[in-house]
Image: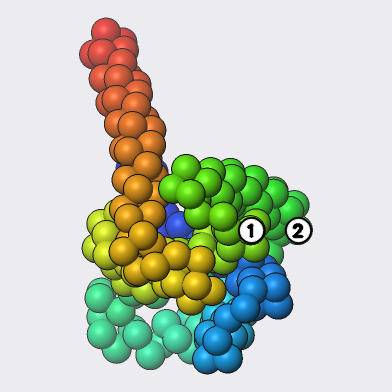
Amino acid sequence: PEVPFSFAVATVLANKLFDLLTVMVFLLIAALTLPLPSQARLALTIVPAICLVLIGGAFGASAWRNRELARSRDDSGLLRILGRLGFVGSTAYDILLEFAHGLSTLTSARRIARALFHSACSSACLVVTVWSLMRMLGLHGSLSNALFIVGMIGAGSILPSPPTNAGTHHFFASMALTLPEVASSDVAFSFSLISHASEVIVVAIVGAVCLIGLDWRKAKREVEAREG
């Protein structure tokens, strides 16, 4: 309850931006090393551009929040505009400030370094998993192919998708195998099903354990409050 919803959403977005930086590197490596069609190479240059625009917008939002906090609420031009809507406008202004606060992690060099480190570690684990699944299915793709698959799946996460990225994951994972002609469409789709199932199962188990732990801690605090 002590964490505003808009702040939490912004921190999730900031986390995604760091993941997109890793995706950008993977796709650029794939574009330079894999025998891809010219249209695919062109598309791979668009994704880094989108990443840079999103990161630039996050920096801009954080800078705007700092300027707003440095002045009084009466001097805020945006608040004067939103204030015409009454209570709704004032609430919207506070929500925007909290959202920008969540993005302010991007303005700290120490936080950026830590976030990039954790993102790189998790992405490396995912690359190893993808490469192992390829070997299990008899697909003799290179490390660049594994980077391309992870990059394509990550790029697909930018798009709005249903829970667990169902459909989106399968489309981009299959495309990452068929574009460089590593596998036929049916084998590529089988790979996408196996890779997606392995991710969902692990995430579901970790999520369940965390939820149980949070519920247990909440119940413990309630008991201590009653006894106190």
- Tell me the quadrant of the picture where the N terminus can be found: top left
To which quarter of the image does residue 108 belong? bottom right
The image's mark for residue 20 is none
The image's mark for residue 142 is 1
Q: Are marks 2 and 1 in contact (CB under 8 Å)?
A: no
Q: Assign a secondary structure to mark 1.
A: loop
Q: CA distance from mark 2 to mark 1?
A: 34 Å
Q: Assign a secondary structure to mark 2.
A: helix
Residue nearest the viewer, comparing 194 with 180 = 180
The image's mark for residue 109 is 2
Q: Residues within 10 Å of mark 1 (few under 14, many from 20)?
A: some
Q: Is 201 rendered above or below residue 57? A: above
Q: Is 62 rendered above or below residue 192? A: below
Residue at 35 percent across and 85 percent down: it is 82
Residue nearest the viewer, comparing 115 with 68 = 115
Question: Quick check: can you spot residue 93?
Answer: yes
Q: Is residue 36 left or right of residue 89?
A: right
Question: Please, what is the three-letter code of the amino acid marked with disc 1?
Answer: Ser
Residue at 65 percent across and 57 percent down: it is 143
